[in-house]
């Protein structure tokens, strides 16, 4: 069984997932340190990190489905 490594080939979702995960972790840590007036709890952190993980592992074509066709990715055959 061959495992496909999609992280490097699908750079759009990799960038979005990485930024989302980094942003969520930074917000969580800063709220725990008391740098903000709002509370960003662990329960709020989990769904955001899960969404970021899905974006990291997904193909770029998932963005077309999420945005209902607004964001289109050209496949290699269409170029």
Image: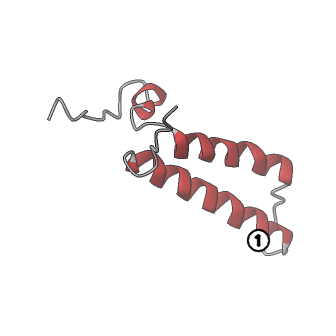
Where the C terminus falls, by quadrant?
top left
Total label count? 1
Please state if 42 lies on the left or on the right of 1 as rendered. Answer: right
Within 10 angstroms of label 1, few (less than 14), some, or many (20 or more) residues? some
Residue at (68, 57) in percent of width and height = 24
Q: Residue at x 84, y 53 (%)?
A: 42
Q: Nearer the viewer, residue 41 or 14?
A: 14
At horizontal 53% and vertical 46% (from top left) the residue drawn is 56
In percent of width and height, residue 27 lies at 72, 63
Image-based side of 10 in relation to 41, left or right: left
Looking at the image, is 60 positioned above or below residue 49? above
Residue appearing at x 37%, y 47% in the figure: 9
Question: What SS does tag 1 mark?
Answer: helix
Task: State the image coordinates of residue 47 (x, y, percent, origin top left).
Answer: 73, 42
Q: Is residue 37 left or right of residue 72?
A: right
Asked if 69 appears above or below 40 in the picture, the reply is above
Q: Circle 1 sits on which residue?
A: 30
68 to 71, vertically: above or below: above
Q: Residue 54, located in which quarter of the rendered image? A: top right
Q: Residue furthest left?
A: 79
Q: Picture coordinates of residue 65 (x, y %)?
A: 44, 25
Q: Position of residue 68 (x, y in %)?
A: 42, 24
Q: Residue furthest front?
A: 1
Could you say which is closer to the camera, residue 68 or residue 57? 57
Q: How is the image coloured?
A: secondary structure
When the figure is inspected, residue 65 is found, relative to residue 29, above or below; the finding is above
């Amino acid at each position: 069984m061959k495992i496909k490594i999609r992280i490097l080939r699908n750079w759009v979702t990799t960038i979005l997932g990485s930024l989302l995960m980094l942003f969520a972790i930074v917000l969580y840590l800063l709220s725990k340190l008391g740098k903000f007036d709002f509370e960003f709890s662990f329960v709020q952190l989990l769904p955001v990190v899960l969404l970021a993980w899905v974006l990291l592992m997904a193909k770029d074509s998932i963005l077309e489905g999420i945005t209902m066709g607004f964001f289109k990715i050209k496949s290699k055959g269409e170029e």
